[in-house]
Amino acid sequence: MSCRMERLLFLILAQLLTTATCDIDPDSESEENDEGDMPDHWTYKDQDWSKGYKLCKENSQSPINIDTSKTTFNNKFPSIIPEGYNLPETEQLELSNNGHTVKLSLPDSMSISRGFTQKYLANQLHFHWGSATTSGSEHTVDGIQYAAEMHIVHFAAKYGNLIEAAQKADGLAVLGILFQVGAQDNKNYNPIFDKLQDIAAEDAHVYIPGFDISTLLPDQLYRYFRYDGSLTTPPCFQTVTWTVFNETVQISQAQLGKLENSLKTAHGTLDSNFRHVQPLNSRIVFASFSPLSSSRRIVPKEDSNAPAEANKSVDSGHFTLGDTLAVIFGILFGCTVLAFVIYAIRQRKRQRSSTERGQKVIYKPAATMEA
Ligand SMILES: [Zn+2]
């Protein structure tokens, strides 16, 4: 009996270790605004943009590497609430290839205000990606670059429009969503990804019916990083309140491939459209969540069937699925130990009492004769 108990304990311990190891495996991988309305004689290959746009070498540029161990917890950052994101099919959204990215125009009936000092209205969303050989997120977390990144650009309602707001210190708010590759298509993105082939040519555009834009966001809208930064494209205005969500969103390799290969420019395939990370300088990066555990990592929205290699994760300071499983197994382990101790005490009592009463013979040999 004690042998079975030992085996059970071993299995629980093994499970505990396996869970912890899998989820801590670190191998992971942000702008803002509509680049298309600005003069665009710049490229991602030569990122020395300050020659033409002097703001690009200022001290509060984006993207940045988010060093989670140096973030400052601030409990005044509540969950982000997307307002008016569920668009009716009658709303026609322009999807375009502007030569730098794929851009989806958004109506200003969409807004965010909770967690901000004022109301910001949506204008557009767009993507940054890599290539077959490189990841393409703009923001990195603990030095790890993610597969791709989406930016939902908003402007302060009080300024009336994006162009006006883009040059005001508190003019823009951008939501940054990091992508990881998982085993399955993320069908929430199909309205966009399925149309990329139709806007292969630079300046091409199509219209797609409205859908629920909030389905493009991760589930955990209460865990995010917040800092003051800039557009990640020229003219690099330092007017963006950045919100980079801690939880990543999964898309399939095939979907990522569509991003990486569908769009063309005069110079070839539009890929690797991400700006390199910029110095943080004296800025503070806030985190809306408290570092509850020593293990910090980014959790994907759906990490069930993702291959371990693609399931890129980073440490980031809070209870994740792995932490929760570790606690559950920890409790199970504790209960098992307790049960074992109780069992051992009972056994000892039983042995003692049977010794006192004199051992009863309960074993009966089986009949040796077989029919
Ligand atoms: Zn961007």
Image: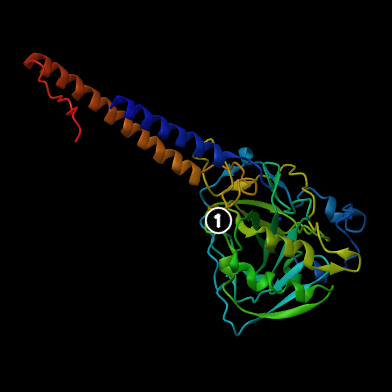
| Vertical arrangement, residue 286 with respect to residue 92, above or below | above
Quarter of the figure with residue 4: top left
Lateral position of residue 366 relative to residue 19, left or right = left
| Vertical arrangement, residue 335 with respect to residue 168, above or below | above
Q: Residue furthest front?
A: 371
Residue 117 pos. (x, y %) = 58, 60
What type is the residue that disc 1 sits on?
Lys
In this rendering, does residue 157 appear at all? no
SS label for mark 1: loop
Lateral position of residue 340 relative to residue 105, left or right = left
Residue 162 pos. (x, y %) = 72, 71
Q: Residue furthest left?
A: 357
| Vertical arrangement, residue 139 with respect to residue 270, above or below | above
Residue 227 pos. (x, y %) = 66, 51
- Identified at 68% across, 72% down, the residue is 194
Quarter of the figure with residue 370: top left
189, 98: nearer the viewer: 189
- Identified at 80% across, 68% down, the residue is 263
Quarter of the figure with residue 143: top right
Q: Which residue has dot 1 on it?
A: 301
- Identified at 70% across, 58% down, the residue is 240
Quarter of the picture containing the C terminus is top left
- Identified at 42% across, 33% down, the residue is 11
Residue 147 pos. (x, y %) = 70, 53
359, 15: nearer the viewer: 359
